[in-house]
Image (cartoon, rainbow, N blue to C red):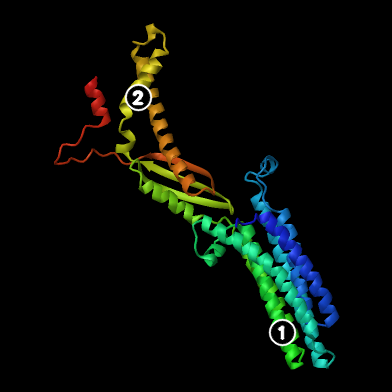
Amino acid sequence: MAASSPARIIKIALASYSAGGLFKLITGLLTGSAALVSEALHSLLDAVNQVILYRGTPRDGAAARHVYAYGGGQMHYRLNLWSAVGLFSIGCGLGLAWALLNLLEIRDGSRDAVGWPALLALTGALLIQGYSLWLAATAYLECMRDNGENNPIRFLQSGGDITLSVIVVQSTAGLAGLLLAGLGILLTWLTGNPLWDALAALLVAILMGAVAFYLGALYLRYLTDVRDRKAERALEALVAARPAVHHCEKVQSLIMDDHRTLLFADIVLAQDSAASGLLPRILTEKKYLLSRLPPEQRADQRLNAFVTARASMDCALKRAELIAAELEQSLREQLPQVAEVSIRVRGLSDFALPKKSRRKPPPSQDAEYIERQ
């Protein structure tokens, strides 16, 4: 079964949170369950956050690129950071106040025990939100496998697909809130003591605070110049495997969003590999440039020296550009999320004569070309 798209999962999550939240709110008010009302607040805040998550999804169209260089991913994270931290922090505060109010009523003896209808309401909400969690988890695991990861916790900590990560976190927290509320209501029903119901409401409020903290940390990852170590290591491995590159002086990256990384690198070319085969290219380019001059100027020594220098620069630059382009192409094939690569050639390795070998080395391409002349 193919995984659903993030947009469809958001819509299903929105419907489940809205329906479950209203159902729990009405039942909680009718039965007097503090935990059920607190969990209803949790679900309704989840629903509002899904709306903001859907509206703030980065767009890759021309309109988005006209305003934002890379589709507006940074604005997406700022918007969701404000909404997630703000909403769930407010929810945590309201939930704590509601739980403390109920604890004071219990101390005054004005609270009654909760009946079985509250458990029935929680069972219905569990079925509704469980389906949403199942869809999100299925898409999340498929995305994890596509990224070559096999540890869900590590993939969640790294950010992964942030839209799916947020939905999975919210759905899991919603399920945990339901279980806490259900445990409190069950203990209240069995013991006749409403203290358990109020304590469950308190734990649900604390859970909302934990969700606000985690989502804030997740969004801040893309708003604080975080480096993509995986992309940097991949480029360093490609450089080490290419004889044409002597070493990499500096590699830096910047994560724009969960689908885009910018990478910048300075490389130094190896003189042997970079210079091998360059002489015939220079002479060919020189002949081409001389052919563009009038016949009477081709014997001019000053013009010949200029044409030789120009041909040498052209061929050297083309060789450097080719090496950098091959590195960029290989990196993009390994890591499609690298949106832009800037590789700067800082020069050649230190001058040194080729090392002598006991065996006669095969002639270089330059030597073969000179012998044919």
Q: Mark 2 points at which residue?
A: 282
Relative to 257, is 48 above or below? below
Q: Where is residue 237 in the image (x, y as percent from the top left)?
A: 39, 50
| Closer to us: 13 or 336 | 13
Q: In the rendered image, which residue does mark 1 sit on?
A: 184
13 w.r.t. 297: above or below? below
Dot 2: element: helix
Give the quarter of the image for residue 64: top right
Q: Which residue is drawn at 18% across and 40% down?
A: 356
- Counting residues from the start of the chain, the first of labels 1 and 2 encountered is 1
Q: Position of residue 45 (x, y in %)?
A: 75, 67
Horizontal side of residue 108 vs 284, given as left or right: right
- The residue mark sitting in front, 1 or 2, is 1
**Residue 68 can be seen in this image:** yes
Q: In which quarter of the image is the N terminus?
A: bottom right
Which residue is located at x 41 percent, y 12 percent? 293
Disc sitting over residue 152 in the figure: none
**Disc 2 residue type (three-letter):** Ile
Badge 2 local density, few (<14 within 10 Å), some, or many (20+)? many
The image shows residue 104, relative to residue 25, as above or below, that is below
How many C-alpha atoms fall within 10 Å of the one at disc 1: few (<14), some, or many (≥20)?
many
The percent coordinates of residue 373 (x first, y second) are 24, 19
